[in-house]
Image (cartoon, rainbow, N blue to C red):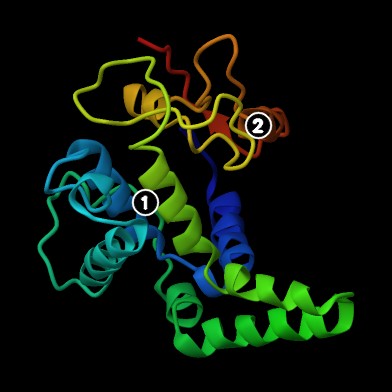
């Protein structure tokens, strides 16, 4: 969807680790799974389709196994998927360790100790610990089961929310599968992708350069 120079690539690689915290995902493994998802959408080779599982939890456990196999290079990955992504092994060695994940979890708990004003707020902590898997479960489960379709793509992708603010545009899955490299996930006049204006600002600041893709 966009390119950036090496400085900003390194900056956002580190920034992704900081913001993902305990839910950090390795860029290579994530990129490969995402490419597999588009290439084999809603088939048995799709690493996260809801149509072969009883619930979102079992789907994500299946995804976790494939992710770990790719991450630890226990499987042979097709060459077309295994290229053109940033790799910083030294960062990943620290970011993807259990010590770091637990440290982030402790940090979240301490933050709540200082700033939570009600006891029930501590019940939100599991969401912080597992935000990555939760977001993935919502997008990949709901985005391929519920909603409407603008395009027939040979899969079961759907646009789950009429105005998709909750997932910042990620639930326009049917639009995204229709034009995977298009920065703006909203295609129709009544749809709005809240991430796209941020990308326009970053491009204006010359931090990124977007790929211009017309919707089919």
**Residue under the point 28% across and 64% down:** 58
Please count the marks in the image: 2
Question: In the visual, does 17 lie left or right of 88?
Answer: right
Question: In the visual, does 1 lie left or right of 102?
Answer: left
**Residue under the point 52% across and 11% down:** 188
Q: Tell me which corner region of the image, top left, top right, bottom left or bottom right, holds residue 208.
A: top right
Disc 2: CA contacts within 10 A as few (<14), some (14-19) or many (>=20): some
Quadrant position of the C terminus in the picture: top left
Q: Position of residue 25 (x, y in %)?
A: 44, 65
Residue extending farthest bottom: 99
* Mark in the foreground, 1 or 2: 2
Give the residue number, with chain letter if any, for mark 1: 85
Disc 1/disc 2 C-alpha distance (Å) = 25 Å
In the figure, 6 relative to 177: above or below? below
Q: Are marks 1 and 2 in contact (CB under 8 Å)?
A: no
Q: Nearer the viewer, residue 58 or 25?
A: 58
In the figure, 44 relative to 159: above or below? below
Give the residue number, with chain letter if any, for mark 2: 194
Q: Position of residue 214 (x, y in %)?
A: 43, 12
């Amino acid at each position: 969807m966009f390119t950036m120079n090496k400085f900003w690539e390194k900056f956002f690689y580190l920034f992704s680790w900081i913001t993902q915290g305990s839910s950090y995902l390795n860029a290579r493994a994530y990129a490969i799974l995402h490419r597999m998802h588009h290439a084999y959408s809603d088939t048995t080779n799709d690493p996260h389709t809801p149509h072969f599982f009883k619930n979102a939890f079992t789907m994500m456990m299946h995804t976790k196994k494939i992710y770990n196999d790719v991450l630890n290079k226990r499987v042979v990955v097709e060459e077309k998927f295994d290229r053109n992504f940033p790799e910083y092994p030294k960062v990943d060695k620290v970011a993807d360790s259990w010590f770091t994940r637990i440290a982030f979890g402790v940090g979240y708990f301490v933050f709540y100790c200082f700033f939570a004003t009600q006891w029930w707020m501590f019940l939100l902590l599991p969401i912080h610990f597992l935000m990555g898997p939760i977001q993935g479960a919502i997008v990949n489960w709901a985005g391929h089961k519920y909603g409407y379709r603008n395009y027939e793509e040979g899969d079961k992708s759907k646009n789950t929310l009429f105005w998709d603010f909750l997932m910042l545009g990620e639930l326009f899955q049917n639009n995204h599968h229709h034009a995977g490299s298009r920065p703006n996930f909203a295609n129709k006049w009544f749809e709005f992708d809240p991430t796209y204006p941020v990308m326009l600002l970053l491009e204006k600041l010359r931090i990124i350069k977007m790929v211009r893709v017309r919707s089919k």
